[in-house]
Image: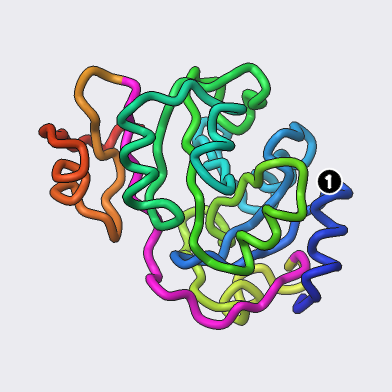
Amino acid sequence: MLSSFADCRRQLEAGNLAVLPTETVYGLAANGLSQSAVEKIFKLKGRPSVNPVILHIQNIQNASAYADVCDNAIKLANEFWPGPLTIILNKKDIVPGIVTANLKTVGLRSPSNTHFQSMLDCLEFPLAAPSANPSNRTSPTSAQQVINLFGSATPPILDGGATDLGIESTIVNLTSSIPCVVRPGHISATAIEECLGIEVKSSEKY
């Protein structure tokens, strides 16, 4: 249940799960480059394998290790990272297919929560970390909500108090000719348009 930073780090390095706070919701984290570790996320959440998960990284400089970084990605990252924006780019082979639902793209995000960033600083891999709830349940904004959702199956939790925003990150897909917001969130499509200087579209398709 509630655990120390050091123990959560040990669990992640051992290929296990840990629950970490972000500025949006609590995330169910695992080594994002490990097929077996990410499988544990899907199993605990009951998440369909066709649903990709987001890779959490330190900054845009790290992004090139996992995806083909374009100019628009750099502009958005410079404006909104760390923060509640996920950027979809064409992935590199290092990213396991389970993370991307075998798509050729991957969602990357740099969370602003200091606990999460400190964990990333200590690790040699990015973290896959969808919301720490069973699929189709409300995303948790506190450690206690995670415990209420998973009960005795709850992985170690780093308690960072209540999250600041309480909604998932905005997701923008940059792999097509026109950027597309595929999940609305705290950062609006208008803010993205102002940053890029071009019109963006909206779609519910990842």
Q: Position of residue 118 (x, y in %)?
A: 67, 62
Q: Which residue is mark 1?
A: 15
Q: Position of residue 106 (x, y in %)?
A: 50, 30
3 vs 108, nearest the viewer: 108
Q: Quadrant of residue 2?
A: bottom right
Image vertical order of residue 99 relative to residue 178, above or below: below
Residue plotted at (20% across, 53% down) = 188
170 in the magenta segment: yes
Q: Is residue 96 left or right of residue 91?
A: right
The main secondary structure of the magenta stretch is loop
Q: Amino acid at mark 1?
A: Gly
44 vs 181, nearest the viewer: 181
Highlighted range, magenta: 155-175
Callout 1 secondary element: loop
Residue plotted at (71% across, 48% down) = 30
Image vertical order of residue 125 relative to residue 134, above or below: above
The quadrant of the image that shows the C terminus is top left
Q: Is residue 10 left or right of residue 129?
A: right
Q: Position of residue 136 (x, y in %)?
A: 46, 55
Q: Is residue 158 left or right of residue 185?
A: right
Q: Is residue 115 left or right of residue 48?
A: right
47 in the magenta segment: no
